Image (spheres, rainbow, N blue to C red):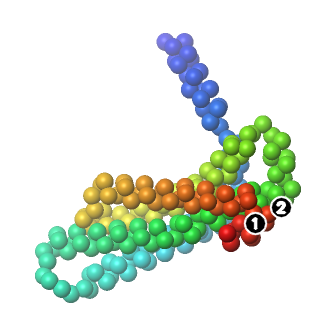
Amino acid sequence: MTDLFLRLGQPVRRAWDQMENPVLGREFRARMRGGRTYLIQGVFTLVVAIGVLITYWALLNQGGPVQSLNEKAATTGRAIWTWGCLIQAFLLPLMVPAFTSGAITLEREREMLELLLLTRQSPFQICTGKLGSGVGLGLVLVIGSVPVLSLAIMLGGVAPTEILSCLAVLATSVVASGALGLAASSIAPKTMTATVA
């Protein structure tokens, strides 16, 4: 029985070793060591929470046709979810390129890019590691805002398929804007130029 597990485990181990990316691991460790990442996460979640609370307060004090309590809760929940997702859809494409726009240019400015290219990592692995680090932080922002938006789920009015589709769109926008920032970083000569671009 043990031999069977060992034989089945070898292909899994080989696949894991092929997917391992030291650049990604180093970038994640470096990014998570400082307090800046946690400050960004806190401010982003606070902005989404303020937007959700303003929406909730505005809908709670809104007059209009008399609705049943369930209809009002569903309407409020749907508006909270919509506005929370719109706030994220506006903020994420502005923030995520800033996470990746200095990935290559910082290495070039520190004169470490040549050393990085001399390692066993292919340029594709280096780029995916740098992209994965910035996109990972953007996805952490999306996941961190889900508890704030859970008020909409408790009130109702939002279907599970809508929740999943909205989170998929936000994740896709994070990946796309991160790739855009990485492209600017590989083209621009300086970090400031890449960030502005």
- Residue 113 in the image: state x and y as whole percent: 82, 51
Q: Which residue is mark 2?
A: 109
Camera-side residue of 188 and 102: 188
Q: Going from the N terminus, do you reach mark 1 or mark 2 first?
A: 2
x then y, percent, for residue 134 = 62, 57
Secondary structure at badge 1 equals: helix
The quadrant of the image that shows the C terminus is: bottom right
Q: Residue at x 52, y 62 (%)?
A: 141
Q: Identity of the amino acid at label 1? A: Thr
Question: In the shown orientation, is residue 156 left or right of residue 32?
Answer: left
Judge the density around disc 1: few (<14), some (14-19), many (≥20) Cα neighbours within 10 Å: many
| CA distance separating discs 1 and 2 | 8 Å
Q: Quadrant of residue 188?
A: bottom right
Q: Residue at x 27, y 58 (%)?
A: 159
> Residue 187 falls in which quadrant of the image?
bottom right
Q: Could you tell me if residue 54 is visible in this image?
A: yes
Specify few, some or many for label 2: CA neighbours under 10 Å numbering under 14, 14-19, or 20 or more.
Answer: few
How many dots with numbers? 2
Image point 39% across, 59% down: which residue? Answer: 166
The answer to whether the residues at label 1 and label 2 have Cβ atoms under 8 Å apart is yes
**Three-letter amino acid code at the position of disc 2:** Glu
Q: Which mark is residue 57?
A: none
Q: Position of residue 65 (x, y in %)?
A: 14, 83
The numbered dot on residue 191 is 1
Q: Depth check: give the residue in front, 132 or 3.
A: 132
- Relative to 196, 53 lies left or right: left
Q: Secondary structure at mark 2?
A: helix
User: Is residue 13 placed above or below 103 in the rendered structure?
Assistant: above
Observer-nearest of 14 and 108 = 108
Task: Look at 59% across and 29% down and name the residue there.
Answer: 15
Q: Is residue 140 visible?
A: no
